[in-house]
Image: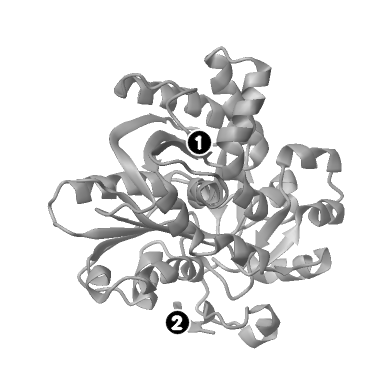
Amino acid sequence: MAHGIEALNVYAGIAQIPVAALFTGRGLDEDRLTNLDMRRRSIGLPFEDPVTNAVNAAKPIVDALSPDERDAIEVLVTSTESGLDLSKSVTSYVHEYLGLSRHCRLLEVKQACYAATGTLQLAAGYLASGASPGAKALVIATDVALVDERAGYAEPATGHGAAAILLGGRPAVLELDLGAFGLYSYETLDSARPTPQFDIADVDRSLFAYLDCLTHSFADYRSRVEGADFRTAFAHLAMHTPFSGLVRAAHRKLMREESATAREIDADFERRVRPSLRFPSEVGNLCSGSVYLALASLLSTADIPAGARVGLYSYGSGCAAEFFSGVVDQDSAAAVRALDIAGRLERRRELTFEEYAALLPENLKALVPVQNRVIDVDRYAAYLPAGEALLVHTRTKDFHRTYEWR
């Protein structure tokens, strides 16, 4: 029986700033914009946190299910670098506000930008085992950005939001090639979040690790999958996208290892990779949701033939990586396009640099554990989209967060 992704949705906030405006505001070298290859960057608001992002990404998927299908979700996992507590999981809040069955496994997982893929593979294996016939799993990669001027060139590339992935036995979006995967992991400190208010990054180390892990994880994939040629086995590619320039370098590296010429590499990039970069260029790095943002972009923008195999690469700092694959078709594209991710990205409110800078002090408090806090959502009412209910964080009382639909 086939297993894989039944539904996929992305929530990338309701505000954005043009990346060129952010470069100008920070006095960054605008010659570096070309390699970054980003147009806009999603910005969180003071009433958004990993819970609201997760719920707002998953709710359209859950709402489209029948009551029996909703009750079949017996595994709910949030993958996040933006945990709210050292014991209580983000998932417990998400479970409550999605209204899921109480007969459900709840987990929060962490492995930088790889965690959602690791969870997806473990959940898919559980579902395929038949241990609980008809069961579904909901995996939600959700994060907030903790960057300001201290982050340098990482600030314009860092995204905000969540990707929700429903797994089951009717994979309308992506049928996983079960058993077709390649792994590569080792310990390194290329980036980290040592406090709930600040990220650190060793950019050079991170870029090297990303490229190194791609080469070795694909080599491991090829050792498991007979005849797996990087140039011919995949109709399209979707990769973890910290920024598009790194994806281009990664594609070039593997193509050169396959003895491709420069002209072949450029043409192949435009055909197989470029469609996956449209949404990342509008959002920024969505952490462990990044590869699924790229997959959503691919299915929303490319001409997808029947039975097209997609190669996916997931990388997380620290580090862990996986190359895996699955099959999509025209119905996959239709299922993702029906959620109008592109339209919602277009409808985000555009911020000036001054508006963005004024939001940062409050945004950087999103993960700080405080006993009591009240968020004046009405102050930001103009940001809320008309005719669309969103979950917002309104207060914390005795360390317990509460949320409302607005």
- Dot 1, how many residues are within 10 Å of its Cα: few (below 14), some (14-19), or many (20+)? many
**On screen, residue 135 above or below 329:** below
Q: Which residue is labeled 2 in the image?
A: 398
- Note whether residue 309 is visible: yes
Q: Nearer the viewer, residue 121 or 364?
A: 121
**On screen, residue 236 above or below 347:** above
Asked if residue 267 lies left or right of residue 352, the reply is: left
- Note whether residue 29 is visible: no
Q: Secondary structure at mark 1?
A: strand
In the rendered image, residue 289, in percent from the top left (x then y), is placed at: 49, 52
Q: Residue at x 59, y 43 (%)?
A: 275
Q: Which residue is labeled 1 in the image?
A: 237
* Dot 1 or dot 2, earlier in sequence: 1
Q: Looking at the figure, which quarter contains the C terminus?
A: bottom right
Asked if residue 231 lies left or right of residue 91, the reply is: right
Outermost residue, top side: 259
Q: Residue at x 74, y 37 (%)?
A: 35
Q: Secondary structure at mark 2?
A: loop
**On screen, residue 373 above or below 223:** below
**On screen, residue 124 above or below 48:** above
Q: Label 2 amino acid?
A: Asp
Quadrant in the picture for residue 72: bottom left
